[in-house]
C-alpha cells in the first residue's frame, strides 16, 4: 500500500469513527463503550487477533475521556487499593443502581454491609451466584487491586 493510499484509508476510517476515537461528550463516550464491548465480543483471545489494534485505540480514547471526568477520577481513586471483591461489588452496585437489599446472592442487607466494610468475606457460593447473575468470571473477584 502506498503512503497516499494509507492516508486515504485512515481519513475514511476517521470520518466513520471520529466520535469513537475523539470522545468529547457523554453520548460519544456511551457509543464508544458500546462499540468496544461489541468488538471485544467479536475478538479472539489471542495476542495476534486483527482487532487488537482497534481495541487498543478505542480503549485509549475512553481512557483519555474518562481521565478528564472528575466523577470518574474520584471513583478510580476510591477504588484503588480496595480488595478486588469489594471494588467489583461497589462497581456493580453503582452500575446497576443496587442497594444492599438487591443482592440476595450475598445475604441480607446487613451481610452486604459487612462485606462492603471488609468485615466479612464473600463466600464461594455468593461469588458463584454473583458471577452467574452479572455474567462475570469468578476470578474477577480475586484480581489484584489497581495501583
Image: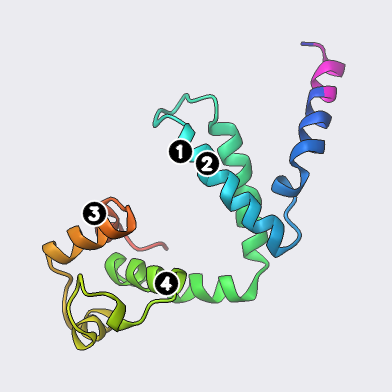
In terms of sequence position, does the residue under pointer 2 or pointer 3 come before the other? 2
In terms of sequence position, does the residue under pointer 3 or pointer 4 come before the other? 4
- Eyeballing the image, is 84 above or below 3? below
Residue pointed to by mark 1: 41
Magenta span covers which residues? 2-8
CB under 8 Å between callouts 1 and 2? yes
The residue drawn where x is 70% and y is 60% is 27
Residue pointed to by mark 3: 138
Q: Does residue 45 appear to the left or right of 73 in the view shown?
A: left
In terms of sequence position, does the residue under pointer 4 or pointer 1 come before the other? 1
Find residue 4 and report its horizontal and vertical position in percent.
Answer: 87, 18
Label 2: how many Cα within 10 Å (few below 14, some 14–19, many 20+): few
Q: Farthest residue toward the top?
A: 1
In terms of sequence position, does the residue under pointer 4 or pointer 2 come before the other? 2
Figure coloring: rainbow
Residue 38, numbered circle: 2
Disc 4/disc 2 C-alpha distance (Å): 26 Å
Find residue 47 and report its horizontal and vertical position in percent.
Answer: 43, 28
Disc 4/disc 1 C-alpha distance (Å): 26 Å
Q: In the image, which is nearer the foreground, mark 4 or mark 2? A: 2
Amino acid at each position: 500500500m502506498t503512503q497516499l493510499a494509507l492516508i486515504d484509508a485512515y481519513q475514511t476510517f476517521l470520518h466513520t469513527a471520529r466520535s469513537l476515537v475523539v470522545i468529547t461528550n457523554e453520548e460519544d463516550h456511551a457509543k464508544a463503550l458500546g462499540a468496544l464491548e461489541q468488538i471485544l465480543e467479536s475478538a479472539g483471545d489471542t495476542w495476534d487477533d486483527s482487532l487488537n489494534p482497534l481495541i487498543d485505540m478505542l480503549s485509549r480514547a475512553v481512557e483519555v475521556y474518562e481521565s478528564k471526568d472528575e466523577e470518574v477520577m474520584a471513583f478510580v481513586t476510591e477504588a484503588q487499593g480496595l480488595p478486588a471483591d469489594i471494588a467489583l461489588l461497589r462497581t456493580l452496585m453503582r452500575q446497576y443502581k443496587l442497594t444492599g437489599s438487591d443482592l440476595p446472592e450475598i445475604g441480607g442487607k446487613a451481610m452486604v454491609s459487612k462485606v462492603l466494610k471488609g468485615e466479612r468475606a464473600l463466600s464461594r457460593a455468593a461469588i458463584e451466584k454473583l458471577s452467574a447473575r452479572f455474567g462475570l468470571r469468578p476470578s474477577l473477584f480475586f484480581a489484584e487491586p489497581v495501583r
